[in-house]
Amino acid sequence: MFKLLVLEDDKDLNRTVCAFLNGSGYQAVGCLNANDAYDALYGETFDLIVSDIMMPGIDGYEFAKTVRALNQDIPILFMTARDDLASKQRGYRLGIDDYMVKPIDLDELYLRIGALLRRAKIAASHKLEIGSLRLDMDQRTAVYDGEEIPLTAREFNLLYKLLSYPGKTFTRTQLMDEFWDADTDTAPRAVDVYMTKLRGKFENCDAFRIKTVHGLGYKAVIL
Amino acid sequence: MTKAKKRGVASYFIAFFLLTAFVITSSMLLFLTYFAGSAGVEYTRENLFTAAVVTFGNAVFLSVICTVVDILRRKVMVGRPVRAIVEAARRITNGDFTARISPKAALGASEGFEEIIDCFNTMAAELSGVETLRADFIANVSHELKTPMAVMQNYGTLLQGPDLPDEQRLRYAKAITEQSRRLADLITNILKLNRLENQQIYPSAKRYNLGEQLAECLLRFESTWEAKDIDIETDLEEEVFIESDGELLSLVWNNLFSNALKFTDPGGAVSVTLKTEGAFARVRVSDTGCGISPEARGHIFEKFYQADPSHATQGNGLGLALVKRVMDIVGGQIAVDSEPGKGSAFTVKLRRAL
């Protein structure tokens, strides 16, 4: 069972979030200030941290910074009333993984925690498994039903990205920015060519489909 | 008579005296020079002295008359309009924004009072307009805030009832969640609007790809259009750059997209286009929703205005006010055209960064 740490100085909010997470199949531990959270983290291992920003004493930024310095991998989700871009930027620069603005929707929190944990697992193992399809990041291999499907490095990276975030649509420019050199002259339409190739190579694979979303971008849908 | 007034009267008198004395002396000198030269009159010390005293008295008398006449004229021509202006200014200071000055108080165009009164009345009209807006805003805010509060309170009370069947308990709890969500949205929007209106905004302008921003904003609504089975048509010209505050503009796109999806019935269509027009980029968001009546069109950018009461529960009437405010800040234009029953289209025009 995944263990989550919830750092939030408002008692009622802390209690409701913990109660909800405990009722959703996680084991949540609530802390009312950063020092308690440090103690908890010292005593046992956690899989994910949910933290407020504005707290008396040590605030969320400082807390996240300290945790990141000690642990590069643990997902941190900020849950805060501050909805300005500057606060978000500051958080992401410190290495947080997700950001939710209060009042938060508990169902959405559940979904996001699930996605963060899944991605953390993918990131830690460098492996992805969907049905009988296995992608190995270190070897850059895609194996479907025991048979390797040959992919170029860029094809593999694109596929790995899409399958790491199933259901999420990426625009062509977002994909270009990540997998093409910054000084490339290639038009965003070049992504289309790769998607066509990928679809062709995985024609017989019924683990996922690559969908075009209204000319806006692409997403992988798991079947 | 106050000291200042006394000093005023004295200075008028001295001015008039100097003037009359100068005029009389000059005329006398001219007159006597020519008259004495031709008539051969002898000046004796004695009659010169008498003439001087009489002339001096004459000058003093004329100055007094002029001073009195001038003071009376001022009392009427200046004092009355000044009193009217002071009176009106006092009423406005005390919060009575209906105070106006009758243009008749200016007594013609003298001394520029007409202009002052004109300006004053314009200012008073503006002030009372602002005041009405403020009063309406507070009334609207309190109504919008209190309604969901009341609903939540009621359901909370109902939930405390004993022997409540599970089904009802669930319904009440859902209603509370729903209302608190509505309240949260409202507060978020009020705070955003407040930040945009009352604080000095320094838009941080950066050059960025407008089409990409539109695509990313639109994609956030993917689950909404999928759930409502709404067809999305996009025609976004590529490589269109603008130099503006992206965070502020994303408020505009999010509000326009969410409105278009909200007012379009299942099975309808929403279309988003981006085109360049000379030095401008034109974004058009159109839907096949219920449309906006011509009467409502003039009001949609006002705070808390909701044209269609049947959708009132889904919004708070602040979205388009936010949009308008952002357009004012970034210096863009927004226009709407709509045919009731067929749909609406919002067009935003922004200057391109070349």
Image: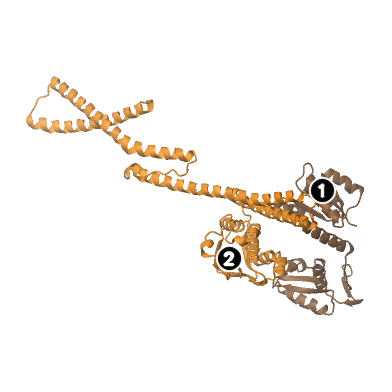
Q: State the mark number for residue A36.
A: none
Say which quadrant the N terminus of chain B sits in.
top left
Chain drawn orange, letter? Answer: B
Disc 2 designates what residue? B346
Is residue A181 visible in the rendered structure shown here? no
Occupied quadrant, residue B221 = bottom right
Q: Position of residue A101 (x, y in %)?
A: 73, 54
Disc 2: which chain? B
Left or right of B87: which side holds A43? right
Closer to us: A96 or B35: A96
Residue lying farthest to the front in this orientation: B163
- Give the SS element for disc 1: helix
Q: Position of residue B61 (x, y in %)?
A: 22, 27
Q: State the mark number for residue A15.
A: 1
Can you say whether A203 is above or below B281 in the image?
below
Neighbor class of circle 1 (other Cα within 10 Å; few <14, some 14-19, many 20+) is some
Can you say whether A100 is above or below A62 in the image?
below
> Colour in which chain A is shown?
brown
Amino acid tagged 1: Arg
Can you say whether A3 is above or below B34 in the image?
below
Amino acid tagged 2: Phe
Disc 1: which chain? A
Say which quadrant the C terminus of chain B sits in.
bottom right
Q: Residue at x 54, y 59 (%)?
A: B299
Closer to us: B306 or A209: B306
Q: Residue at x 20, y 27 (%)?
A: B58
Can you say whether B179 is above or below A35 in the image?
below
